[in-house]
Image (cartoon, helix red, strand yellow):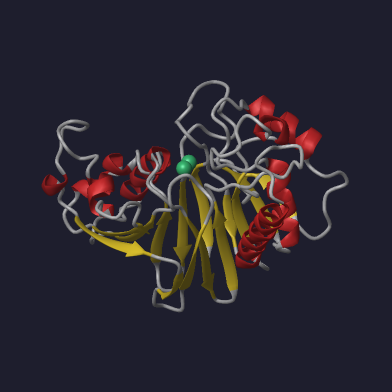
Amino acid sequence: MKIKFWGVRGSIPCPGPHTVKYGGNTACIEVRLENPDRLIILDAGSGIRELGNHLLARGACRDGLKADLFLTHTHWDHINGFPFFTPLYIPGTHVTVHGPIAMENDSLEKIVGGQLTYYYFPVQETDLAAKIEYRELKEGHYDLGDGLTLEVQYLNHPLLCLGYRFTYQDKILCTGYDTEPFRNIFHTDPADPGYDPDMAREGELAARQENERIQNFFKGADLLIHDAQYTLDEYEPAKIGWGHTALETAIETGLKSQVKRLALFHHEPVRTDQALDDLERTLFPSPPLPDMELFFAREGMEIHL
Ligand SMILES: [Zn+2]
Ligand SMILES: [Zn+2]
């Protein structure tokens, strides 16, 4: 598997002179299988626009482009590049969009393709030259053909969000964004009028089990791409419940899951290149961890598994 980052930011694109090194585009990752040649795209944030231009430039659309687009969820930073993916305007393109069912009555097609209505965009989805199919995913195991398999696990986010575990030729790629650790939802302070010791214990146990389930899902990955939008200082208490992880916690998760490489991802848009470099110096373990390579994902970065 060859992985390339085309967008690494969370929330909103933030291009400019202060985000040149790590990039300002929102989530988009290209995954390539070499034999047979197969294109998989994870999320359609603004980074997918550059990926589309790159594919055009290398003539990938000449004989009809086929791609599987896996959406982790449909928050805007993960789909806002979709209407700007130029291959969609070229006859012969065939894109299969895989993703979660967010709400009972709203299909994936309605949410993603709904960006291509006159309220938001000058072109309607029905006017696109490409063939677009939608496949809704649930927790479980999927055989994607060519020796590629996928396991799907629900993460912890305000909207249903899918964690992915791809396996190909004994190599494992996992995604763990957007998510935050499960917490005890019951009162834990005995001084609190609503405190119930049994409920508090139950809540503690349930949160621990859910977190262990996610750690097991990432177990032994060759590469885990994980949410690290905040630092612990930023996360507690102001941003609990917003669906993102502190980078210190992401590192702990990577260690517990014994992953070989951990790419910290979904960077907070206010984080400048300088700020990310500073966090690397102050919050990354020193000396570097012997068994887990750790880095901030950067636009243009390529990893070969
Ligand atoms: Zn996001
Ligand atoms: Zn989100």
The one nearer the camera, 252 or 301, is: 252
Q: Position of residue 20 (x, y in %)?
A: 56, 28
Q: Is residue 285 left or right of residue 82?
A: right
Whether residue 50 is visible, yes or no, is: yes
Residue lying at 19% horizontally and 46% vertically, measured from the top left = 89
Please state, as top left, top right, bottom left or bottom right, where the C terminus lies in the image.
bottom right
Q: Position of residue 122 (x, y in %)?
A: 16, 32
Q: Is residue 147 left or right of residue 263?
A: left
Q: Position of residue 38 (x, y in %)?
A: 39, 66
Q: Is residue 126 left or right of residue 137?
A: left
Quarter of the image for residue 264 reads top right
Location of residue 245 with respect to 219 vertically, above or below? above
Whether residue 221 is visible, yes or no, is: no
Location of residue 19 with respect to 266 vertically, above or below? above
Judged from this view, the residue extending furthest toward the right is 287
Quarter of the image for residue 208 reads bottom right
How many marks can you see?
0
The one nearer the camera, 261 or 239, is: 239
Residue lying at 69% horizontally and 62% vertically, measured from the top left = 259
Judged from this view, the residue extending furthest toward the top is 17
Judged from this view, the residue extending furthest toward the front is 193
The one nearer the camera, 18 or 239, is: 239
Q: Position of residue 188 (x, y in %)?
A: 72, 45
